[in-house]
Image: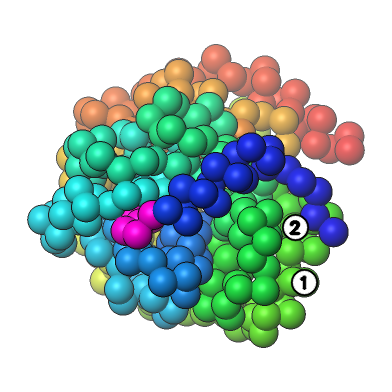
Amino acid sequence: MLSRLVEQHKVERFASLLDRADKVVLTAHVSPDGDAVGATLAMWHFLKAKGKDAHVVLPNAFPDTLSWLPGARDIVLHDNDAARAGELLDAADVVCCMDFNAARRVGALQEALVKSPAVKIMIDHHPGPEDFCSLVISHPELSSTSELVFRLVCAIGCWYDLSYESAVCICTGMMTDTGGFTYNSNNPETYYIVSKLLEKGVDKDDIYRRVFNTQSEGRLRLMGHMLSECMTVLQDYAAALVVLTREDFCKFPVNKGDTEGFVNMPLSIRGVIFSAFLREDKDMIKVSLRSVGDFACNELAEKYFGGGGHKNASGGEFHGTMAEAEELMKKALLEYQDRLVAARRANQDK
Ligand code: 5GP
Ligand code: MN
């Protein structure tokens, strides 16, 4: 049995808003990951089966490793077709804002989202939800937004209506946001949910293979280059710093999104509980942070890189040169050194 996590009045409002809506848009954060795509597509299948005119509208492309997801081809990308994305948001009765907690997290889609007259419902698991939705269903204690979708569907009494396609999308979101159930995944109910998804016919092992073991050759070679040439291990800080510049990318045939998961790799080194990944993007340096245990990397992301996220997975941006970004990261490391070393000790003592 699942505990009743979402307050009853929110469940009722959610059900009645969807019931009355005809046109629904499901959207998620920029550079959508498995949870963002999984959660929106799971809701899309569910609503389509209920006869709604539903559309998934995302700010930009998602990784190729998710293109097999049922419904992925029907997703409207704002950066491919801004006019269509704007039309759908304008016409919607309800917009579900999924897997993000602040309007700016949808990037260039923000203006159309804010302008849309639709009722907005936040369905998310990031801490610190901002005030831009009239119904906020926010549960940072959950593994993923996809898990929250499962719980909501059950809470409104629709478990029997949940299709195989929705179940596949939910399982993918839960699996990707927990690194294949290796972090953020100690809640026994997570596995109860997985067991219910298996009952719907989901092949969990096949999803794992499709998501994690279908990389491009270029990505694997870039990973090798990164580990050998671009990673500095700073044991005095219990940390590792990875820097990938445009020149590094040029050496390998890779696509956007091909560095997904790179930031986790240094955490497999003994003694490293914090990984910082700096990637040179078109007009900024993207910062990705990961930590293990007590060290809250979202605090560092917010303080130094105008970002945020979860305790153990966060990110931000830097506008300037890579050398300046590295300098700032080193300053941050110095400030957090004692906390990093203490967090490493706490992990070892467990
Ligand atoms: P990733 O490192 O995979 O890009 O992001 C990990 C998590 O960090 C995301 O799920 C999101 O919560 C958070 N995050 C990443 N970049 C940003 C950012 O620029 N701003 C904020 N507020 N959060 C971010
Ligand atoms: Mn998520």
User: Could you say which is closer to the camera, residue 29 or residue 10?
Assistant: 10
Question: Identity of the amino acid at label 2?
Answer: Thr
Instruction: Answer whether residue 175 is visible to the viewer in this image.
Output: no
User: Could you say which is closer to the camera, residue 11 or residue 283?
Assistant: 11
Give residue 182's quadrant in the image: bottom right
Instruction: Identify the residue position indicated by label 1 in the image.
Output: 195
Q: Position of residue 287 (x, y in %)?
A: 39, 38
Q: Residue furthest front?
A: 20
Q: Residue furthest right?
A: 350
Give the answer, above or below, for where 247 lies relative to 52.
above
Is 59 placed left or right of 340 in the picture? Answer: left
Instruction: Identify the residue position indicated by label 2 in the image.
Output: 190
Question: Which label belongs to residue 20?
Answer: none
User: Could you say which is closer to the camera, residue 342 or residue 36?
Assistant: 36
How far apart in space, not on screen, are marks 2 and 1 (Cα)? 9 Å
Q: Residue furthest top?
A: 335
- Which residue is at 35% across, 64% downward? 54
Q: Mark 2 near mark 1, Cβ–Cβ under 8 Å?
A: no
Is 334 placed left or right of 141 in the picture? Answer: left
What quarter of the picture does the C terminus occupy? Answer: top right
Q: Residue furthest left?
A: 83
- Which residue is at 47% across, 56% downward? 19
What quarter of the picture does the N terminus occupy? Answer: bottom right
- Which residue is at 26% across, 71% downward? 253
Q: Residue 22: say if magenta.
A: yes
Q: Which residues are magenta?
A: 21-27
Question: Identity of the amino acid at label 1?
Answer: Ser
Q: Respond yes or no on whether mark 2 lies under 8 Å from ligand 2.
A: no
At numbered mark 1, what does the secondary structure look like: helix, strand or loop?
helix
Give residue 251's quadrant in the image: bottom left
